[in-house]
Amino acid sequence: MNDQSIHFRSVLARRMTLMVLLFSSVITLIGTGLQLYLDYRHEIHQLTVRFEEIRQTHLDTLTRQLWVTDADAVLLQMEGIRRLPEIRYLEITRPNATTLRVGEPETRPASMIERSYSLEHDYREKRIPLGTLRIQADLGAIHQRLLDRLLVILVTQTIKTFLVSLFILALFHYLIGRHLAHMARHVRSAPSVHGSAPLLLTRRPLSDRVPDELDQLVDALNRKDAAYRDLLQEISLSNQELMSHRDRLEETVRARTMDLMTANQAKSRFLANMSHELRTPLNAVLGFAQLIAKDPQITPAQKGHVEIILHSGAHLLDIINDILDLARIESGRMEVESVPFDLGALLHELVAMLRGRAEEKGLELAIDQSSSFPRLVRSDPAKLRQILINLIGNAIKFTRVGGVTLKLYVNGLIAPGNKRVLWFEILDTGIGISPEEIERIQMPFVQLNQSGGTGLGLAISRELIGLLGGELRITSVPGQGSDFAFSIAFESCASHEVQSTHDKNAPVIRIDNAGEFGILVVEDQVENRLLMQHLLSMHGFPLRMAENGQEGVRIVQEWQPRLVMLDRRMPVMDGLTAVRQMRALPEGRQAVIIAVTAHAFDNERKEMLDAGCDDFLAKPFSENELHLILRKHLPLTVVTGDEERGAVVVEETWNPQAFASLPPDLIEMLHSGLVRLDLEAIRVVIARIMEQDLMLGNRLQRAVERFDFAALRKAVSVFLGEQT
């Protein structure tokens, strides 16, 4: 349709039509309802008048006829009354006589009106009751008349409303709608900076008529267009200035970002170099000091000197680790390693370690543990251990009299990730902290009363608590003590998920099958090579040494060692390149490669693992840490215990993949025999295994002789589970 036609599809037209129709319909319904109500009242009034006429005209006659007991005359007169309009049914009820009825009674109360009259005869100045006249009038005819009137009214009003709506709509379109549509098109064609034609309506000149609201609206729109054009010009100029400023700002940000990246890279390189340069000699110092401390021939005085070396070296290592932890946290490299672990065992070990320090000062270190506090949880045990050592160590350090209490309880709140919350509260009776000092001591390198140390412990603990999904709360009263409470998020775990650490810290007396596993040490520092040579050769491992990665690759190709331990930073060929070349060799694909390096950042460790290393051992390491990683990757038969007390335990590490070379039927037969503890069946299976893998068969035979069925059954079950 064009602009001159009625535009029913426009929103405004539809709304106007609906409003007119709705208003007209409401008025029609109200008027019709009122008219019908009045008509109904009139019809009912007429019916009431008719009842009164019947009473006045026929009641006396019916009474006389009943007095003379002329039933036929009564029925005849009743029939006459029934023939009146709307009268449907009459009934005379007489005492001790037959009821007289004319017509059919109506049982629906809504469809009839009923009147009852008493029939009484005057006899000797007494009114003698002769019966009761009941008359029913039918409302059906009245309802039908009202319905007919309703239909007529609705049809006529609908036609009238429709015609009025069309007229109003046409009038609205001619006077207003077409001009609004023209204004909308003009507004949609937004004015440009260079200007546009003013808005004009197709109407009579103003000289021939009086200005109205549309003229005022057109004038206002034209003024707005002019102001908008001026504003566009100002915005265009501002945009040009902003673009120029943005370009300069982006260039400045890029330059500053490059400076920051360069500074961060320099900082990371410095920390990595510092870590390597300090940890590498520290590894030799602590390693040989540990060996000297175990020498039974040294004097008590010499042993005391060695313990001072070990203590000072450990303190230096703690400082290095604190600085590196702070750098990792600031750079966002610190990650949470959530694993199942025995929280009860960790707390027992920590308290046992710190109780000696407390007792030296005459303090009591106590634990107040809630009965609902869990033993097996999933979280990051290393970070939790570091937090507790820092906070409990500080409490002991700043307490002179009284003691330190570690409270343990569970909060019912749910942390993000649908995890529950553990609370650890360290209370002491120490010197306390003033309110203004509480915030300050949580900052890096801030010390309380120049108490010694680096001032990093509390700052690092606060960040680690945040990483573990918790918070740190500090309350203190100077002179009375302090309360350090922190929470961590945790998940429950089952006992089979927790790796047993039983006897893992017991000293290794000997390794019976060490001669079966050749080890290559690739290390450029002669001191560290000598340390590794001493620690490994004392158990009988066949050893080869290499001073750089290139030499290590050659020895792997020639000698085919079972395990390779190599440093990352070496001359000629570094550790990363050496690992990649070893893995490319057929002789190096089956070897276990352990990165032994002073590089402590997680991304550097990840680079070594991505290059092909199986595990990572950080310098400086203890003899026990070296034994643990060897037992993790090699099927060693280890004898542990305390020689002074004669306590000896033979432990053999079983890797489920040791059974990968066996046929499936042999593995199933071995598993069945282990489950049933059928020694004869187990020996038969081992004999068949020896025919295919003599070394594995001998190991199985030794395990059976020691009755080590549980470890065997677990390893075989794990292997079968992995295959399925």
Image (cartoon, helix red, strand yellow):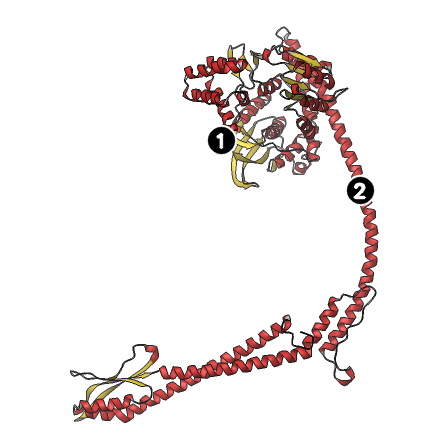
Q: Nearer the viewer, residue 452 or 639?
A: 639
**Does 15 appear above or below 83?**
above
Left or right, residue 369 beside residue 217? left
Of the two numbered discs 1 and 2 on the same chain, state the one appearing first in sequence.
2
Q: Is residue 144 left or right of residue 328?
A: left
Please state the horizontal and vertical placement of residue 641, each as a whole percent of the image: 53, 13
Residue at x 61% of width, y 72% of height:
14
Observer-nearest residue: 605 or 4? Answer: 4
Q: Is residue 197 above or below residue 112?
A: above
Q: Position of residue 516 (x, y in %)?
A: 59, 12
Q: Which residue has dot 1 on it?
A: 494
Q: Does residue 598 appear in this view?
A: no
Which amino acid, mark 2? Arg
Q: Which residue is mark 2?
A: 254
For residue 173, which quarter of the picture?
A: bottom right
Residue nearest the viewer, comparing 683 with 446: 683
Q: How far, Cα to Cα, is label 1 from label 2?
A: 52 Å
Mark 1 secondary-structure assignment:
loop
In the image, taking residue 99 as reference, residue 567 lies left or right, namely right
Circle 1 residues within 10 Å: few <14, some 14–19, many ≥20: few
Find numbered disc 2 in the image and state the secondary structure of the residue it sits on.
helix
Front in this rendered view, residue 558 or 625: 558
Image quarter hosting the N terminus: bottom right
Compared with 100, 629 (above or below) is above
In this orientation, does residue 390 appear?
yes
Decide: few, some or many residues near mark 2? Use Cα within 10 Å; few <14, some 14-19, many ≥20: few
In the picture, residue 18 is in which quadrant?
A: bottom right
Height in image: 491 above or below 555?
A: below
